[in-house]
């Protein structure tokens, strides 16, 4: 029988039996559902059909949807929440970080040698092996024959004789190369030190492999040149692999949608291709990162709204970060009185981006960390809002440090505060040093003040700046401690319900998607994360230990934590 006839026959028979239209593809029962719906915040069960939620309610209601082929997920006391939405992260950098060796947690030189040896065995001869994050001060012991605190390359070269190796230092200010990489860069006993760097050598004049500052670029530019010669097919495959790895990482943390905060057109083109093949592992909401001229030429043809790929936002950056004294402040830094930070673009340039955004129906999302940066962005937005455009939902990314007077302006202008709660925990010591205690208290991470003023506050991780863990950020939002566990102006903490909403429904709103996702409600996309405990009722300490046991996207199980749900297998959308 031909497939179409068979399909029609089966469909007609099913209709005739009165069952086809009524059964779910998947039901989730046996636990608690946190819906993030104000009218009914809790439920017992969910039914899913064709990627959409068709029932939410008590067990009996959902059991009515069960048919012969319905997959049943028994929570056994676990908790289902709306799939988390990463509100501000860098998807491709996340994938990239999984493609090179992560040496951040390495505790000895021998461990590095072992990791590189294993990578060399798995690589084609001649292929580069890259890594980053090593730091000799994290090593438990240092071998005897070190030069400048770091061993010579011999042991590394022995395990990777055919593959050039380049390993970036955690500081970003040095790299380490093996013999093959030094040879590819033409570094020999005769090579002069470059300006601004030193080739570290042993007593015989031979390079040890350690390349501080610009000496590292002698090797990295050879690597870059070799990568540039790859074929189009190789690059496309590598991009797909990068997306796949980022997707794995997101799904393992219950993240089903991701706001990608700054993507160039060239990368967007590849995303569009992967989307057309049905290969995006999570739903991407893309903020374009390009200059005004390129935006003016291209915005119209890039705009799209889809199930897995939406492009309707522009990312701009008005200042730097607080740690490097780059955040643009109204008054000088407490620990650098001669500086108020810096603007990375002038407000006039931002005003032109604002005009282009309105002209082409794009949202504008501008990175601002300091109180001056935030005020300047609000000024530009306020001017732009003189022209009547419906429902702009413009955002300020980070909105970390505000003048208290500007809180109400977010509310009046309907500007979204796109914040990352985890940054407060990580940056607390910096904030106090850079701003001093008074300005830190009145202006840093004002979640409570903003929420009370009626501002939409979103949440995220800024991955790879922080690990992509909604749980970490929820914990930071709720307890508001620094990394050492000291309270950091806890008066600005969120309630648990607010924190969960910030990572789900508020992030959906910030992407114009609150009618599609962000809560568990009939008609919405079936994106669900399953947690091992109830984050609304466990002790605050226990929140931090919460594990994601399963992630469902579009009604399909895409992640199952090892050892959980033995009868259910997760399937990847595409594999490269
Ligand atoms: Zn970012």
Image (cartoon, rainbow, N blue to C red):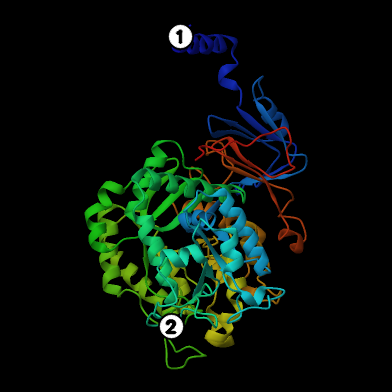
Q: Residues within 10 Å of mark 1 (few under 14, many from 20)?
A: few
**Vertical position of residue 142 compared to residue 566: above or below:** below
> Residue 2, labelled with which disc?
1
* Residue lying furthest bottom: 337
Residue 135 image-quadrant placement: bottom right
Q: Position of residue 205 (x, y in %)?
A: 49, 80
Q: Nearer the viewer, residue 165 or 93?
A: 165
* Residue lying furthest top: 1
Q: Residues within 10 Å of mark 2 (few under 14, many from 20)?
A: many
At x 72%, y 29%, the residue is 60
Q: Position of residue 291 (x, y in %)?
A: 28, 63
What residue sits right under mark 2 in the picture? 329
For this view, does 347 lie left or right of residue 15? left
At x 43%, y 73%, the residue is 188
> Residue 28, labelled with which disc?
none
Q: Nearer the viewer, mark 1 or mark 2?
A: 1
At x 73%, y 39%, the residue is 75
**Vertical position of residue 286 compared to residue 68: above or below:** below
Give the secondary structure at mark 2. loop
Residue 388 image-quadrant placement: bottom left
Cβ atoms at labels 1 and 2 below 8 Å apart? no
For this view, does 510 lie left or right of residue 17? left
* Residue lying furthest front: 204
Residue 557 image-quadrant placement: top right
Q: Nearer the viewer, residue 240 or 82?
A: 240
Q: Position of residue 175 (x, y in %)?
A: 50, 71
Q: Nearer the viewer, residue 412 or 64?
A: 64
Q: Look at the image and tell me whether residue 363 can be seen.
A: yes
């Amino acid at each position: 029988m031909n497939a179409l006839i068979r399909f029609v026959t089966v469909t007609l028979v099913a209709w005739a039996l009165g069952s086809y239209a009524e059964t779910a593809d998947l039901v989730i029962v046996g636990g608690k559902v946190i819906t993030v719906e104000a009218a009914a915040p809790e439920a017992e069960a969910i039914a899913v059909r064709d990627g959409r939620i068709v029932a939410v309610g008590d067990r009996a209601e959902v059991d009515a949807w069960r048919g012969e082929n319905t997959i049943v997920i028994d929570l056994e006391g676990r908790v289902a929440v709306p799939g988390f939405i990463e509100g501000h992260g860098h998807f491709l950098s996340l994938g990239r970080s999984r493609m090179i060796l992560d040496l951040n947690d390495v505790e000895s030189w021998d461990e590095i040698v072992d990791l590189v040896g294993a990578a060399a065995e798995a690589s084609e001869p001649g292929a580069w092996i890259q890594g980053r994050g090593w730091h000799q001060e994290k090593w438990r012991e240092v071998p005897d024959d070190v030069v400048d605190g770091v061993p010579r390359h011999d042991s590394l070269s022995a395990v990777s004789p055919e593959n050039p190796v380049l390993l970036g230092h955690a500081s970003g200010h040095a790299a380490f190369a093996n013999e093959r990489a030094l040879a590819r860069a033409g570094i020999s006993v005769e090579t002069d030190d470059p300006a601004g760097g030193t080739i570290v050598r042993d007593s015989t004049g031979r390079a040890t492999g350690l390349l501080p500052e610009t000496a590292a670029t002698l090797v990295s530019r050879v690597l870059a040149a070799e990568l540039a010669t790859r074929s189009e097919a190789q690059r496309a495959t590598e991009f797909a692999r990068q997306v796949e790895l980022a997707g794995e990482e997101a799904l393992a943390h219950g993240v089903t949608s991701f706001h990608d905060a700054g993507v160039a057109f060239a990368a967007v083109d590849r995303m569009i291709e992967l989307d057309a093949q049905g290969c995006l592992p999570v739903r991407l909401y893309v903020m374009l990162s390009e200059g005004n001229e390129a935006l003016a030429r291209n915005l119209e043809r890039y705009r799209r709204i889809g199930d897995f790929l939406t492009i309707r936002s522009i990312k701009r950056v008005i200042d730097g970060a607080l740690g490097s004294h780059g955040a643009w402040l109204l008054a000088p830094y407490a620990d650098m009185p001669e500086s108020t930070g810096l603007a990375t673009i002038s407000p006039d340039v931002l005003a032109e981006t604002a005009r282009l955004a309105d002209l082409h129906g794009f949202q504008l999302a501008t990175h601002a960390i300091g109180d001056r940066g935030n005020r300047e962005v609000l000024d530009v937005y306020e001017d732009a809002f003189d022209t009547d455009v419906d429902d702009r939902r413009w955002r300020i990314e980070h909105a970390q440090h505000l003048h208290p007077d500007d809180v109400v302006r977010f509310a009046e202008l309907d500007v979204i505060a796109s914040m990352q709660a985890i940054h407060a925990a990580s940056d607390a010591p910096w904030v106090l040093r850079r701003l001093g205690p008074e300005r830190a208290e009145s202006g840093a991470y004002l979640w409570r003040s903003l929420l009370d003023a009626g501002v939409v506050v979103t949440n995220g991780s800024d991955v790879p700046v922080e690990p992509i863990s909604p749980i970490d950020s929820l914990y930071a939002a709720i307890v508001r401690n620094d990394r050492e566990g000291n309270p950091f102006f806890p008066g600005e903490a969120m309630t648990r319900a607010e924190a969960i909403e910030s990572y789900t429904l508020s992030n959906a709103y910030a992407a114009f998607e609150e009618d599609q996702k962000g809560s568990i409600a009939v008609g919405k996309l079936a994106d669900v994360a399953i947690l091992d405990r109830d984050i609304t009722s466990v002790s605050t300490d226990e929140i931090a230990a919460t594990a994601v046991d399963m992630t469902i996207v579009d009604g399909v199980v895409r992640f199952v934590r090892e050892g959980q749900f033995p009868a259910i297998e997760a399937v990847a959308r595409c594999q490269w």
